[in-house]
Amino acid sequence: MEKFTTLEGVAAPLKIVNVDTDMIIPKQYLKTIKRTGLGTGLFSEMRYKEDGSENPDFVLNQPAYRHAKVLVAGDNFGCGSSREHAPWALLDFGIRCVISTSFADIFYNNCFKNGILPIVVSQSDLDKLFDDADRGANATLSIDLAAQEIHGPDGGTVHFEIDPFRKRCLLEGLDDIGLTLEKGEQINVYEGRKHVEQPWL
């Protein structure tokens, strides 16, 4: 998993509450278990018209936000079914951080397992970040995970809380497999001892 230390990029405002995982990546894209290629399906029911052409009114189709790295979203982001394809699609599009006042638990956990930083802020801080994100190409936010700070284009700073263990995993690029491999030496010792004590296994 790619490490998350600092991130600087354009923030796109998605002023919608209760964005569920089917809105993030509709069910027709769930046939694959590959983590790549899903970016084209991200928010597809809002990004594209029925004829397949782009909807120019959707934020990620607007020139200023086509390469957004941060998504500033309404309350209860990621609710609905527990599809890991949702963070995969965000990551494949290029979004590495989502900021909201609250997240659905499963989506929130899946973000950390895939190298995306979900940040919970107060409503007043979210309103400030929406104002920053409304600036188009000038809507650049800088996120410092170690300091737990979001820096706006005018120098304003928003502090955020994060679980220390999850913070460490992102900073060091550790997913579940990486955490297991950290214990490789102890596992090898255990396996060697079990082979001596119970060779029939």
Image (cartoon, rainbow, N blue to C red):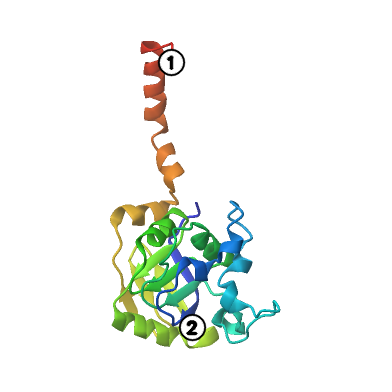
Structural crowding at the residue carrying mark 1, measured as other residues with C-alpha within 10 Å and reported as few (<14), some (14–19) or many (≥20)? few
- Of residues 183 and 99, which is closer to you in this image? 99
Viewer-side residue, 106 vs 13: 106
Q: Which mark is residue 139?
A: 2
The image quadrant that residue 144 belongs to is bottom left
Report, in whole angstroms, how far the alpha carbon at label 2 lies from the one at label 1.
60 Å
Q: Is there any visible trace of residue 155 in the rendered image?
A: no
Secondary element at image label 2: loop
Give the image location of residue 83, x and y in percent: 48, 58
Q: Which three-letter amino acid code belongs to the residue tagged 2?
A: Ala
Question: Residue at (42%, 11%) from the top-left corner?
Answer: 199
Q: Is residue 118 left or right of residue 1?
A: left
> Residue 53 sits in which quadrant?
bottom right
* Residue 201, disc: 1
Q: Secondary structure at mark 1?
A: loop
**Which residue occupies 43% across, 61% down?**
5
Q: On the rendered image, what quadrant is the C terminus found in?
A: top left
Q: Residues within 10 Å of mark 2 (few under 14, many from 20)?
A: many
Q: Which mark is residue 127?
A: none
Location of residue 128 with respect to 159 vertically, above or below: below
- The front one of 36 and 51 is 51
Q: Can residue 185 be seen?
A: yes
Question: Residue 77 lies in what quarter of the image?
Answer: bottom left
Marks 2 and 1, the one that precedes in the sequence: 2
The three-letter code of the residue at mark 1 reads: Leu
Where is residue 88? Give x, y as percent: 53, 59
The residue drawn where x is 29% and y is 58% is 163
Q: Given this view, does label 2 or label 1 mark the residue nearer the observer? A: 1
